[in-house]
Amino acid sequence: MHNRNRNKPNQKGRNPTSRFARLDHRLLNSPAYRALSVTARALLVELTMLENGGNNGSLFLSIRDAAGRLGMADLSAVRGAFDELQGLGFVEMTEDASFHVKAAERSRARCWRLTWLAGPGRKGPSLAFMARQPQPGTKAHKRMERGTRALKGYRQGRDSGKFPILDSETLEGN
């Protein structure tokens, strides 16, 4: 029998057939997020997709698998994205890669925890990214400054009743 109500939310307001990747606005608006490269931002989304509400701290993703998910061939760029996410406090490694163990016994990939979500055993979020910023003079710091300035301009335009994109100089000459 076909169930017509399968896409309707259940009693708790959840849709059992659809999932989403939760990226909190305090994360997206943080200076640390603004400092991330595009590759690190995409990797953050991929890691968030692995989280199911009960497995944070057990998110297994290797550099090679992450590169595949991102459609990239450059493993060093993906390794750098993992380093960025760790350095700015978005993820914590809960288990390092293990290549000396047989594949049948346990995963060889690194295991990750998203810091803005509760961890294993209902360990609360650390929100480490809220207190971190890149070193001044680095590319990441310049990205952070540009991104923060753009957000500030958008908010000011929105709050003053202007729609910032319509007032953009890039639209002139069309």
Image (spheres, rainbow, N blue to C red):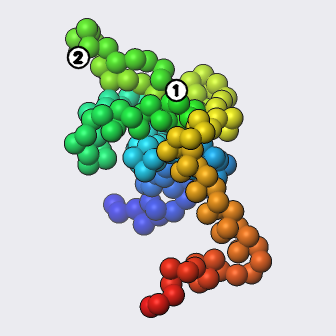
Quadrant for the N terminus in the image: bottom left
Q: Secondary structure at mark 2?
A: loop
Q: Judge by depth and name the residue closer to the eye, 6 or 91.
A: 91
In the rendered image, the vertical position of residue 110 relative to residue 76, given as above or below: above
Task: Decide if residue 45 is in sight here.
Answer: no
Q: What number is the disc on residue 103?
A: 2
Residue 33, image x and y in percent?
A: 57, 46
Q: Residue at x 26, y 45 (%)?
A: 72
Residue 73, image x and y in percent?
A: 22, 42
Q: Judge by depth and name the residue closer to the eye, 31 or 97.
A: 31
Q: Few, some or many C-alpha atoms within 10 Å of disc 2 (few <14, some 14-19, many ≥20)?
A: few
Q: Judge by depth and name the residue closer to the eye, 142 or 117.
A: 142
Residue 77, image x and y in percent?
A: 33, 39
Query: Badge 1 is on which residue?
Result: 92
Q: Secondary structure at mark 1?
A: strand
Residue 143, image x and y in percent?
A: 53, 51
